[in-house]
Amino acid sequence: MNECNASFGSAEEWREKAMQRSGSIDGDESERRSALAEAHNRKHKIIDPDILADQQLYILGKMDLEEYQAYLLFKHGKAG
């Protein structure tokens, strides 16, 4: 599932392509991830719609953790 960020012109394009994929996890795992994200968001008062949309990439299994981290680095800065 891991995509190379060099193949995308922007983080928005990467997110859109990922959301078109089928999820790679079952419903129970998605619910678990969602509950963890909700607790984290509540604790840290995260309400930004862009952040919440990004979280869905991992919650729904559209990206594995490695790709999700690479996506966030691509979107918000450079690695290293």
Image (spheres, rainbow, N blue to C red):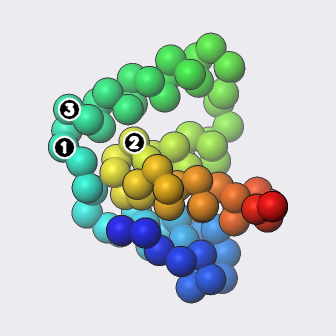
Disc 3 marks which amino acid?
Answer: Asp
Q: Amino acid at mark 1?
A: Asp
x%, y% of residue 11?
Answer: 64, 68
Can residue 16 be spotted in the picture? Answer: yes
Q: Which residue is mark 3?
A: 28
Name the residue tied to disc 2: 59
**Quadrant assignment for the N terminus:** bottom left
Question: To which residue does mark 1 refer?
Answer: 26
Q: Which of pointers 1 and 2 lies earlier in the amino acid sequence?
A: 1
Q: For the point 51% across and 43% down, which residue is it?
A: 55
Q: Nearer the viewer, residue 1 or 44?
A: 1
Q: Are marks 2 and 3 in contact (CB under 8 Å)?
A: no
C-alpha distance separating marks 2 and 3 = 11 Å
Identified at 68% across, 20% down, the residue is 45
Outermost residue on the top side: it is: 43
Residue sitting farthest toward the front: 80
Q: Are marks 1 and 3 in contact (CB under 8 Å)?
A: yes
Q: Position of residue 68 (x, y in %)?
A: 52, 55
Q: What residue type is disc 2 on?
A: Ile
